[in-house]
Image (cartoon, rainbow, N blue to C red):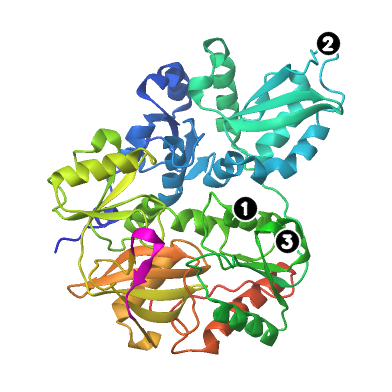
Amino acid sequence: MALSKPLTQEEPPTRSADEAQTLLIVGRQQDKKPLEASANALKLKLLSASEYLSKPELGIAAKQIINLCAVEDYLSQGYYVSLLAKARGQRAVPNIDTITGLSWKKLYKNHLAELGKLIAGKVPADAPTGPKDAITVECYFGEPNHAWAKRLAARAFRLFPAPILEIKLKHGKAGWAIEYIWPLSSASVDKADNARFCDCLSDYHNNRRNFGLPKRKPSFDIAILVDPQEKMPPSNEQAIRHFIRAAERQNLHAEVIGKKDLNRLSSFDALFIRETTNIDNHTFTFARKAEELGLPVMDDSVSILRCSNKVYLRESMARARIATPKTFLVTKTTLRDVLGQLPLPMVLKIPDGSFSRGVVKVKSEAEYLAEAAKMLEDSFIVIAQEYLPTDFDWRIGVLDGKPLFACKYHMARGHWQIYNHKAGGKTDSGAFETMPVENAPDAIVKAAVKAAAQMGRGLYGVDLKQVGGQAVVIEVNDNPNIDAGVEDKFLGEKVYDAVMGVFRQRILASKGLAAPTASADKRA
């Protein structure tokens, strides 16, 4: 059964001495023309998003990506440029944190009051103040189109480093206020303003500013975010009680909170998310808020971003030379290219599915074209993957770089996946076997720990198959299941103690009372 070779197993192309270390990425081929002269003068390599996404070898030497694509939607073209830049070890401006932070006003609204103070008394007195009147401040790399908005633009760029920011001001009873902040693409730059944009690009490139934000100090205690209405939560009620008792053994006070308790986070010392995470729901908002407050959090927002997207997984596993099923990225323009390169049946996946949702097995060319086209209506990229049938998947829990538990998850009866989602909302799942980590194949554990390391230093569940003696990583999940009676079947309370022990260490480190740990499994 054929397995893909990780991209980095091949010898990298020889880099020329004058190869650009910074890439300038635009949305379409026609968007290159206004920037060609500046790109040449600054020795920047100019690529379209399609070229960057489909031909990673074009930017192999690049250290920095200036993403000038539209990033208005989650899973949009520009979103993937910054996401894959992270997977390829390149610094992107804007990065994924900035894109997601600006995608939902609820994530940045706390900064609006601070930014609003910077325009007090600055807006020209003759500016129209009718109910329909507004002022738009266009910022290129922190430089505004209005001289009076310099402090506003600089601070906005420090908070949200994006090449082009549009800040809309509206006048109300209390005076001028900021209505929204939005990242724009280079295609939005007027022809008459292109020279100013290129000047700002040159200033930024030659002075490479790396802004950082101070983090607020946390307080005490640990919050466990739970949704009692969730049908398939990552921990059942009994497991939550085990976590609370484990916290007490670590001299921590654990309290269960819900999605309405966002404003209470500052009264806690750490956040443990025990809901199914996604970047477009409140779990991601909680993670980001906790990080703003300086609280240790699992899952952290970076882990949620990386693990929730299978495109990032594919790129990061390839870069780390970790075996995965043979995989192709499918777009509307490359829809038919996969046919003939992957045998049927094959598996199609939306980038951010979970619990086997958004995953289908297609058996014919017609079925592939129909299902892929349907998925591409909602996502710019769809994953086409080699079908590797096995009786079970391995699940290795990894905590802070160390293997925590080992399970075999068997396929649901009469189905090819662990979960079989049936009509009417019913879900069947297969049997499980929990065992000591030492009893799992060494290659499986090593691959799991190495794969988890590409995502971060949190709590992960790595799904793998063993094919011909080789460990093949299928997914790395943030927020993995730890259910009483399943994942704790062998270790019992030690599973919960291990998690709360890591929280305790991180809390102490956040207060300067202990050094951060740098643990790693010796078998990796």
Q: Position of residue 237 (x, y in %)?
A: 57, 77
**429 drawn magenta:** yes
Q: List the residue tagged with mark 1.
A: 285
Residue at the location (45% across, 31% down)?
24
Q: Where does the magenta region start and end? A: 421-431
Residue neighbourhood size for the residue with mark 2, other residues' Cα within 10 Å, grouped as few (<14), some (14–19), many (≥20): few
Q: List the residue tagged with mark 2.
A: 126
Residue at the location (60% across, 27% down)?
203
Q: Position of residue 466 (x, y in %)?
A: 24, 73
Residue at the location (55% across, 88% down)?
493
Q: Are marks 2 and 1 in contact (CB under 8 Å)?
A: no
Query: Disc 1 versus disc 3: distance between alpha carbons?
Result: 11 Å
Q: Residue furthest front?
A: 424
Q: Quadrant of residue 451?
A: bottom left
Q: Type of residue at label 3?
A: Leu
Question: Label 3's element?
Answer: helix
Q: Quadrant of residue 394?
A: bottom left
Along the horizontal axis of the image, is 248 left or right of 95?
right
Mark 3 or mark 2, which has the lower sequence index? 2
Mark 1 or mark 3, which has the lower sequence index? 3
Mark 2 or mark 1, which has the lower sequence index? 2
Q: Position of residue 301 (x, y in %)?
A: 56, 56
Along the horizontal axis of the image, is 8 left or right of 511?
left
